[in-house]
């Protein structure tokens, strides 16, 4: 990054008020700009008609009501003036990603590009006053005795940022402050609580990363072949993607775990999400109530689905399981959907009780072909049921024992679809292969099955006692 010098520095201390926190849905209601150039200050402010509803909680916070913005210029009418006010200046804001993100999104909707140098005063406070526990604007006001003129109004808050700048200048001197600006403007894409050194510590290798919020609460867990690049992509997207913006605003700390390759990262991510239950991940469910359907023929020749619960479920060993569900309710809903799609009899499937020889409800509403009253033979009903379930058949473990899947510079050891661990040498490999601690997990089953059918099918090693040989995996669909 080009070093900035005092002769070229012009700062625009910016604050905006909005109808909410989503730059795609919400709109700006007020903009305040305090400019500092060659020691001279100037101010610019304007209310903006958002052309959308201002929620009551926002009205109470800012004091900006619908009556105040009605008849005021829209952003598109102010865009040229706003850009002129900000052009060629360092854009300074508290939690700058929010204000910058909103203004950038507003310009983007008009087809205008907006890419100033950005300085976040949250980062500046963290850098220069590390002894402070918090760095939100209220804390900064209290810590430095800033004078409030109009809190939660755009120009009033912009003035507070300029006051804070003067405090920094007086406390540390212009040279140290300029050094801080050079350091922080280069990392403008980072969230306010994350430093460039935090990012540099993350290796650009395979693994999982964990975003933590305040009080060390887990926010998000992800995996990547290039962790540092993937983490940075979250922050670049935060200017336009609502979820990424929320994540960037809340993240306080990033942790990571390196893995040997992609498969290890996928498995670790699944395990970590279940362990930490981060608030911004899709929740993965534990397999403690896992169940599946199994076809059993009764004395009359009818094949009827029986629900096999977790206690008697042996995924990988049982060859006649269909579905794999997290609970009984999910299993019954699935079977009912299959019956409806293929016009099967819900009474014969055990989903509905009827007197023998009487038509089921589905037949009366033309959703059943009539197997319940003999219009369709049991043999045909059996065949239709087998055909309907075939796509959902749980594949039995296609090997005679444990296998190892090459992943980077080590081996992922799997037996009967269960993850046994990661081995980096032969001793670990065979210790894991002898393990009888098989804990079936549905998500890991899906990961391993996909790996064996795709990119890892040529990386499989079968483990038989002391023998090691490459396995033919063509049978793994």
Image (cartoon, rainbow, N blue to C red):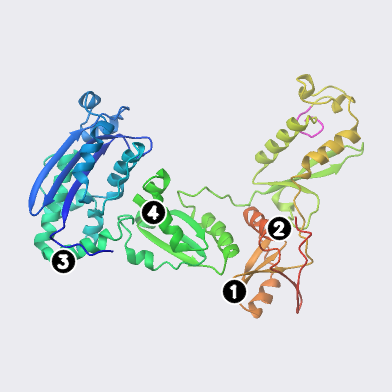
N-terminal-most mark, 4 or 2: 4
Is 255 on the left-hand or right-hand side of 373?
Answer: left
**Residue occupied by mark 3:** 176
The C terminus sits in image quarter: bottom right
Is 296 on the left-hand or right-hand side of 162?
Answer: right
Gap in angstroms between the C-alphas marked 2 and 3: 58 Å
Q: Identify the residue shown where x is 76% and y is 54%.
A: 395
**Residue occupied by mark 2:** 453
Is residue 450 in sight in this rendering?
Answer: yes
N-terminal-most mark, 1 or 4: 4
Asked if labels 4 and 1 touch by Cβ distance under 8 angstroms, the answer is no
Gap in angstroms between the C-alphas marked 1 and 2: 21 Å
N-terminal-most mark, 1 or 2: 1
> Considering the numbered disc 4 on the image, is that residue within a helix, a strand or a loop?
helix
Instruction: Give the crowd class for mark 1: few <14, some 14-19, many >=20 residues within 10 Å.
Output: few
Gap in angstroms between the C-alphas marked 1 and 3: 46 Å
Location of residue 450 in the rendering, given as x and y in whole percent from the top left corner = 67, 56
Is 16 on the left-hand or right-hand side of 270?
Answer: left
**Residue occupied by mark 1:** 409
Location of residue 273 in the rendering, given as x and y in whole percent from the top left corner = 52, 55
* Outermost residue, top side: 364
Asked if labels 2 and 4 touch by Cβ distance under 8 angstroms, the answer is no
**Residue occupied by mark 4:** 235
Q: Which residues are magenta?
A: 346-353
Nearer to me, 305 or 367: 367
Location of residue 41 in the rendering, given as x and y in whole percent from the top left corner = 9, 48
Gap in angstroms between the C-alphas marked 4 and 2: 34 Å
Q: Quadrant of residue 232?
A: bottom left
């Amino acid at each position: 990054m080009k070093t900035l010098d005092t002769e070229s520095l012009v700062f625009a201390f910016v604050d905006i008020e909005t109808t909410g926190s989503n730059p795609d849905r919400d709109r700006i209601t007020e903009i305040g700009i305090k400019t500092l150039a060659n020691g001279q200050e100037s101010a610019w402010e304007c209310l903006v008609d958002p052309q959308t509803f201002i929620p009551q909680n926002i009205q109470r916070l800012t004091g900006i009501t619908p009556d105040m913005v009605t008849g005021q210029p829209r952003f598109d009418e102010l865009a040229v003036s706003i850009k002129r006010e900000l052009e060629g200046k360092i854009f300074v804001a508290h939690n700058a990603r929010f204000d910058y993100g909103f203004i950038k999104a507003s310009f983007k909707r008009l087809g205008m590009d907006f890419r100033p140098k950005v300085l976040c005063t949250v980062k500046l406070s963290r850098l220069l006053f590390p002894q402070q526990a918090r760095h939100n604007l209220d804390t900064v006001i209290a810590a430095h005795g800033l004078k409030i003129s109009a809190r939660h109004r755009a120009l009033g808050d912009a003035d507070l940022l300029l006051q804070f700048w003067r405090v920094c200048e007086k406390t540390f001197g212009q040279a140290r402050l300029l050094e801080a600006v050079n350091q922080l403007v280069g990392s403008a894409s980072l969230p306010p609580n994350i430093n460039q050194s935090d990012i540099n510590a993350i290796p650009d290798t395979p693994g999982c990363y964990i975003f933590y919020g305040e009080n060390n609460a887990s926010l998000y867990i992800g995996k990547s072949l290039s962790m540092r690049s993937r983490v940075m992509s979250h922050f670049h997207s935060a200017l336009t993607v609502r979820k990424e913006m929320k994540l960037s605003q809340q993240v306080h700390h990033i942790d990571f775990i390196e893995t040997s390759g992609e498969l290890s990262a996928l498995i670790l991510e699944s395990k970590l999400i279940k362990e930490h239950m981060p608030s911004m991940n899709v929740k993965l469910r534990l397999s403690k109530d896992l169940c599946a359907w199994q076809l059993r023929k009764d004395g009359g020749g009818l094949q009827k689905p029986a629900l096999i619960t977790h206690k008697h479920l042996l995924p990988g060993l049982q060859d006649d399981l269909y579905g794999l569900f997290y609970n009984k309710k999910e299993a019954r809903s699935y079977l009912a959907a299959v019956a409806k799609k293929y016009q099967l009899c819900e009474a014969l499937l055990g989903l509905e009780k009827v007197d023998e020889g009487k038509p089921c409800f589905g037949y009366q509403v033309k959703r059943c072909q009539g197997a319940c009253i003999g219009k369709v033979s049991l043999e045909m009903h059996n065949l239709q049921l087998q055909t309907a379930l075939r796509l959902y058949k749980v594949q039995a473990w296609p090997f005679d024992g444990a296998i190892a899947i090459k992943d980077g510079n080590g081996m992922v050891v799997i037996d009967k679809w269960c993850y046994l661990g990661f081995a980096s040498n032969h001793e670990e490999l065979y210790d894991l292969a002898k393990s009888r601690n098989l804990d079936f997990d549905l998500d890991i089953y899906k990961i391993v099955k996909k790996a064996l059918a795709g990119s890892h099918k040529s990386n499989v090693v079968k483990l038989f006692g002391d023998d090691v040989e490459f396995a033919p995996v063509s049978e793994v669909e």
